[in-house]
Image (cartoon, rainbow, N blue to C red):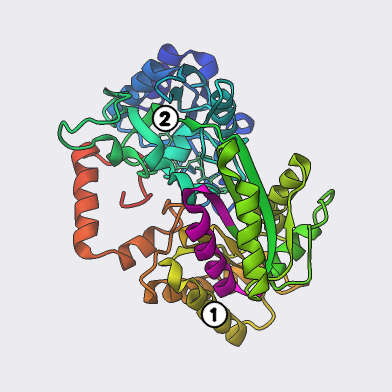
Amino acid sequence: MTAAALARLRECLGEASVLTDDAAVEPYLHDERRLYHGRTLAVLRPRDAAEVAAAVRICADFQLPMVPQGGNTGYCGGATPDESGREVVISLSRLRQIRAVDPLGFTLTAEAGVTLAELQAAAAGVARLFPLSMGSEGTCQLGGVLSTNAGGLAVLRYGTARELVLGLEVVLPDGRLWEGLTALRKDNTGYDLKQWFLGAEGTLGIITAAVLKLFPSPAAKETAWVGVSDLAAACNLLSRLREALGDNVTSFEYLTAESLALVAGLPGMPAPPLTGAPAFVLLEVSGRADDALREALENTLGSALARDEIGEVVLAASDAQRRAMWRLRESIPPAEKTLGGSIKHDVSVPLSALPALEAEARAGIRQRWPEARLSVYGHIGDGNLHFNVLAPAGALAEDFKARHGAAISALVHGAATALAGSFSAEHGVGKLKRDLLHASESPLSIELMQRLKQALDPVGLMNPGKLVG
Ligand SMILES: Cc1cc2nc3c(=O)[nH]c(=O)nc-3n(C[C@H](O)[C@H](O)[C@H](O)COP(=O)(O)OP(=O)(O)OC[C@H]3O[C@@H](n4cnc5c(N)ncnc54)[C@H](O)[C@@H]3O)c2cc1C
């Protein structure tokens, strides 16, 4: 039967778009963090939405489970096939068209395989901004970004991926194409169907294209690196900045000296603009040229300094210095990776509870694993902390993670839950956090999710074993 399925897929997509050779499929079989390694019947590489639909129809006919895969940068194993060898990986990386850019309507229509960096560049080409931005932007793709409802560095001002979408085109689990590519900003004609697929991690269908919202390109941008004593001081600074500059506050990132020390170990890193504080804020404000942003920022930081609420401040004096600041921040995940990876936690709590979350988690780790190294940073403007735990210096990372990962994660997630928080702020659920989802959501929430899954994918072929599947 599988031979017949492969023959149909080859006939439909062409020999070169159906990979079965061990070496050719290998890059598609493991996740970014190498937590999982699966097997596959074949990797399909369709070229457009019609080919995706045809491939899905054939897989549905033969009851073959399907795993959509974009840039494969996800952190929860959502794009990795299981070990059965029965699942078919459907890679969207050849859906590369930017179908339309409408500077007047402030929209851009692109296919699933366009990378986030390419979307930003296409918007910039018509003097518009596509604001989603994150460390993986050179590799992650629109379909994956929307399916994980990715967050990143400018959520504070522009929202998560979900908030940047006007319309979607989706191949349903039975192979039908839902053409919901509307560019309307107002449309109250029933249920908002696109929302079902945003953040669904490929369990309800395959996104093939989307209409995205664009924004005016900010003419002015100011970036600052600020020393702070702790997370409470950082949250206080955010509040003062928002009072003074409102929506001009675009990014507000927290990074501890611990995380910065890990980055210093990477080759070719710029020196931090200042050191010596226990933690730092990397912040950006942006707006119109006549917003007098620099003056307003200087005034706000100056008053905070005068009240001893913050430590030293460095304002980026050039675009090169600004980029160097961001490089330090974005290099934290790769720095952790070079040390064997961390036990990652992507937790969120209401902003006012952030300091308590960090204190609670730190105290718990220090008590039971005093030698463990911590890397604590995050998009705290969104109440989102990455509280990552690394093996003690000199210890074997794999061994430490295997022996202590579950207990450490239970502690950190417990601290977030006790403060009315979430165990997954922006990375999703995938395979990694599936049990946590079931343990933390109410039975009614799980039932509603399962009913939606059942309604769209009654045979359970679309990305099984992920999320509620
Ligand atoms: C260095 C680094 C920094 C990162 N920073 C951030 C950050 O700041 N914020 C953040 O939110 N994430 C971050 N991530 C995580 C990751 O980059 C994002 O989750 C990204 O959105 C995943 O996109 P992708 O194309 O790689 O998706 P993949 O990893 O390929 O897939 C992710 C999920 O989406 C599904 N999927 C993929 N394409 C489709 C499609 N077309 N239709 C339906 N389902 C699909 C997959 O089945 C899987 O469940 C970071 C990752 C790295 C490596």
The quadrant in which the N terminus is found is top left
Q: Is residue 390 visible?
A: no
Compared to residue 378, the image places residue 26 above or below, namely above
Q: Is residue 90 left or right of residue 464?
A: right
Secondary structure of the residue carrying tag 1 is helix
Q: Nearer the viewer, residue 99 or 225?
A: 225
Q: Quadrant of residue 303?
A: bottom right
Q: Residue at x 38, y 77 (%)?
A: 418
| Residue contact between numbered discs 2 and 1, judged by CB atoms under 8 Å | no
Residue extending farthest bottom: 367
Residue extending farthest left: 190
Residue 230 image position (x, y, % from top left): 62, 74
Amino acid, disc 2: Leu
Neighbours of disc 1 within 10 Å: few (<14), some (14-19), many (20+): few
**Image mark for residue 359:** 1
Amino acid, disc 1: Ala
Q: Quadrant of residue 429?
A: bottom left
Q: Which residue is mark 2?
A: 212
Residue 270 image position (x, y, % from top left): 82, 51
Nearer-N-terminus badge (2/1): 2
Q: Nearer the viewer, residue 230 or 303?
A: 303
Whether residue 246 is in magenta: the answer is yes
Q: Nearer the viewer, residue 427 or 348?
A: 348
Q: Main secondary structure of the magenta part?
A: helix
Whether residue 209 is in magenta: the answer is no
CA gap between label 2 and label 1 equals 39 Å
Q: Which residues are magenta?
A: 229-252
**Image mark for residue 164:** none
